[in-house]
């Protein structure tokens, strides 16, 4: 049995980027795991550690060596390995030399394809201590670091300067050098609480020693949950509820090693400023968590995480209050100054901000979006003039002091300023909703005007950027066209908007007339959006062939597409589905191969066999039954009704020769099959289903 020992690697660094720390830790751990698997080393639990000044991985019960492996090399075929006198051929001699043995030491391998000369040997496994440095180095080389740095005169490159390296297998140090640092067993604790070396006797002692001696909570997840609980308790102690943003929580976890929650406060007068402004100042600049009261209103308090256990926590609190006050004062000033001018007065200044060189300024874009928003508003039954008004004001808050300082408040501040200016409530709300959904899973515009402007803005961007040839490729998507396409589709489908996407793209292209020369832009954007729609449904577990079956019919209304998709998904659960899908495939192949003209109508007088007469009658009855269902877009009921054709379809193919010798009879039967297939094609091309 292979011996097993725990393995620990720790890379000690300057403070790592807090927003990237969790991702770096996960990638480091996964890289080491992959390296161990590739080396054929068995191991138990893998535990990553990540703190501001360290990345570490503990591997439990790692094989101390690779298992010995039987190696077999195949040489020449036996019938060509020796001549008639039994002498080895040159190929055989060469093979033996390459294996380092005499020809007589080669063996014979018998297979069902013939006999071969082979060389078999036992390859001794390498000790893990020899393999681990390269495995760690390879994992570090693959970390997602956009820009690596050098320090001093060293050749090593990493995200931050490296100061120490722990490499232990059991209680032994693995002698190596990684990132220009010699390995050892000394780690280091908190920069202030315990800056001295910490002797690590064995891997399993790592986390406890760092915590008890070094005042470092090395486990990222444990530290994050400690912070979460501390923030919740701190807010509760002040009769409030902490609002915990998960991204901020991860970032703060990447900033502190020994978290201590501190509650501070600010003047009540600042609450006259919109809460989003104060929250942005606290979160963005200071990494504070904010608190709300029982009515979910912002409280004049914040929670910060100190990285030290201070003997004078009051001074820590006072210091943070001094730091945040100027930030909130700035927000108050911006709020006051911005309201001295109406949003409408900022429209002309949008002409100075370039959207895209060939597509003009933000003012130009606003005018295009207004035209498209009007068309969408008419289609969804809301007021076109309000949609146009909202579109013309939509980008004006980009010219305000507040959004200049806090870009993440674009749209939100537009709503506040529009309300202050006395704009209609729906117009003001649309200024905020135009950017929705801002991220995956985000809420969608609730108002019809907001929906019209949000869709129009996204379609204008798609048509314009595709029109000038800046199509997304790989990871490059500077105008976030994938997000725009998916956002528009989500709004249409999830908010139940019955609009024709192709028609709206035509309106967007018309608004862009003269800005570029691309006659295929509408088709290109439509196909691109269908690609995003496919990904949208795949994420929801819809089978690819179900999507392709609906796409084949080219429905241009996303809501209609959704109804068809749901119908086909439900149809596939029916016991008749597989047989009818196969029948559709058979009919499609027959019709595709037919070169003769197929009549539009079936001639009842030419029906000879009972099976084809029965199918003809059932198709007619089914057609009458499903026509109103198609008109109502009740595709699920329609396909359920058509599923009743299964038996007569099976009987038809069992008993009737479709490609009869007599031309008239053959053409009539093809017409019958064409009518049958046309019924299913009202929903989707079921011949594309894979079973």
Image (cartoon, rainbow, N blue to C red):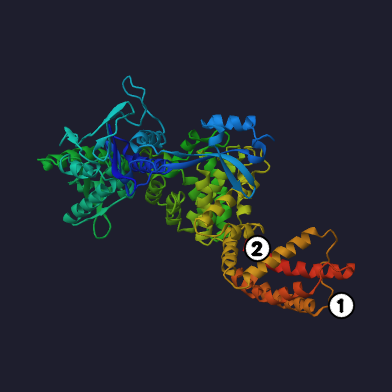
Answer with left or right where residue 297 lies relative to residue 455: left
What residue do we see at 61% from left, 33% from top? 92
Residue 549 appears anywhere in the view: yes
- Disc assigned to residue 504: none
Residue 332: % across, % down: 28, 42
Q: Nearer the viewer, residue 336 or 303?
A: 303
Badge 1 crowding class, 10 Å Cα cut-off, few under 14, some 14 to 19, many 20 or more, is: few
Q: Quadrant of residue 193?
A: top left
Placement of 137 over or under 437, stated as above or below: above
Placement of 605 over or under 670, stated as above or below: below
Residue 385 appears anywhere in the view: no
Q: Nearer the viewer, residue 360 or 14?
A: 14
- Disc assigned to residue 684: 2
Question: Element at badge 2?
Answer: loop
Q: How many marks?
A: 2
Question: Element at badge 1?
Answer: helix
Q: Nearer the viewer, residue 588 or 104?
A: 104
What residue do we see at 77% from left, 78% from top? 611
What residue do we see at 60% from left, 47% from top? 110
Residue 667: % across, % down: 85, 67
What is the spatial separation of the Cα atoms under label 1 and label 2, in whole angstroms? 31 Å
Answer with left or right where residue 641 lies relative to residue 53: right
In the picture of the structure, the residue carrying the numbered disc 1 is 605
**Quadrant where the C terminus is found in the figure:** bottom right
Residue 559: % across, % down: 57, 61
């Amino acid at each position: 049995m292979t011996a097993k020992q725990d393995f620990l690697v720790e890379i000690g660094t300057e403070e790592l980027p807090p927003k990237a720390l969790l991702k770096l830790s996960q990638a480091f751990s996964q890289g080491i795991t992959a390296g161990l698997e590739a080396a054929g080393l068995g191991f138990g639990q893998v535990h990553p550690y990540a703190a501001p000044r360290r990345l570490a991985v503990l591997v439990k019960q790692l094989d101390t060596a690779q298992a010995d492996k039987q190696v077999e090399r195949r040489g020449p075929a036996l019938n060509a390995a020796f001549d008639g006198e039994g002498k080895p051929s040159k190929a055989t001699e060469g093979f033996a030399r390459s294996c380092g043995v005499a020809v007589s030491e080669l063996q014979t391998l018998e297979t069902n394809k013939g006999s071969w000369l082979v060389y078999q040997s036992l390859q001794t496994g390498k000790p893990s201590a020899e393999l681990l440095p390269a495995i760690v180095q390879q994992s570090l080389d693959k970390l997602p670091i956009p820009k690596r740095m050098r320090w001093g005169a060293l050749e090593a490159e990493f995200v931050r300067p490296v100061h120490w390296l722990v490499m232990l297998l059991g209680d032994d140090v693995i002698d190596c050098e990684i990132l220009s640092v010699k390995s050892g067993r000394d780690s280091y604790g908190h920069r202030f609480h315990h800056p001295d070396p910490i002797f690590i006797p064995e891997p399993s002692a790592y986390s406890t020693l760092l915590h008890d001696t070094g005042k470092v909570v090395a486990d990222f997840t444990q530290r994050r949950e400690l912070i979460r609980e501390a923030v919740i308790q701190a807010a509760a102690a002040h009769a409030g509820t902490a609002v915990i943003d998960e991204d901020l929580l991860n970032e703060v976890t990447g900033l502190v090693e020994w978290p201590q929650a501190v509650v501070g406060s600010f003047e009540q007068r600042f609450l006259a400023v919109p809460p989003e402004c104060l929250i942005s100042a606290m979160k963005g600049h200071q990494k504070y968590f904010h608190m709300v009261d029982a009515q979910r209103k912002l409280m004049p308090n914040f929670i910060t995480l100190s990285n030290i256990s201070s003997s004078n926590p009051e001074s820590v609190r006072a210091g943070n209050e001094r730091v945040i006050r100027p930030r909130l004062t700035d927000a108050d000033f911006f709020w006051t100054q911005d309201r001295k001018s109406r949003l409408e007065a900022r429209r002309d200044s949008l002409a100075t901000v370039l959207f895209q060189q060939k597509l003009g300024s933000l003012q130009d874009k606003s005018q295009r979006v207004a035209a498209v928003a009007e068309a969408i508003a008419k289609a969804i039954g809301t007021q076109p003039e309000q949609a146009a008004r909202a579109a013309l004001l939509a980008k004006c808050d980009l010219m305000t002091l507040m959004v200049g300082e806090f870009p993440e408040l674009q749209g939100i501040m537009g709503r506040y300023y529009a309300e202050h200016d006395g704009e209609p409530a729906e117009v003001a709300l649309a200024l905020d909703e135009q950017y929705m959904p801002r991220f995956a899973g985000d809420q969608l515009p609730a108002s019809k005007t907001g929906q019209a402007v949000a869709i129009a803005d996204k379609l204008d961007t798609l048509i314009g950027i595709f029109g000038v040839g800046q199509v997304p490729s790989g990871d490059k998507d500077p105008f976030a066209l994938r997000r725009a396409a998916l956002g528009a589709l989500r709004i249409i489908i999830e908010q139940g908007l019955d609009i024709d996407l192709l028609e709206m793209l035509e309106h967007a292209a018309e608004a862009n007339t003269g800005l570029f020369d691309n006659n295929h832009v509408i088709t290109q954007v439509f196909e691109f959006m269908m690609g995003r729609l496919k990904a949208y449904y795949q994420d929801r577990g819809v089978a690819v062939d179900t999507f392709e079956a609906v796409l084949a019919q080219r429905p241009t209304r996303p809501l209609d597409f959704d109804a068809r998709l749901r119908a086909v998904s439900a149809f596939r659960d029916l016991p008749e589905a597989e047989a009818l899908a196969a029948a559709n495939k058979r009919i499609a192949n027959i019709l595709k191969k037919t070169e003769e003209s197929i009549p539009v109508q079936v001639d009842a007088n030419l029906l000879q066999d009972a099976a084809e007469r029965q199918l003809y009658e059932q198709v007619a009855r089914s057609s009458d039954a499903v026509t109103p269902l198609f008109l109502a877009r009740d595709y699920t009921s329609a396909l359920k009704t058509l599923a009743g054709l299964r038996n007569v379809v099976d009987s038809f193919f069992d008993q009737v020769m479709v490609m009869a010798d007599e031309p008239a009879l053959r053409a009539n039967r093809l017409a019958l099959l064409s009518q049958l297939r046309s019924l299913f094609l009202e929903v989707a091309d079921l011949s594309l289903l894979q079973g």
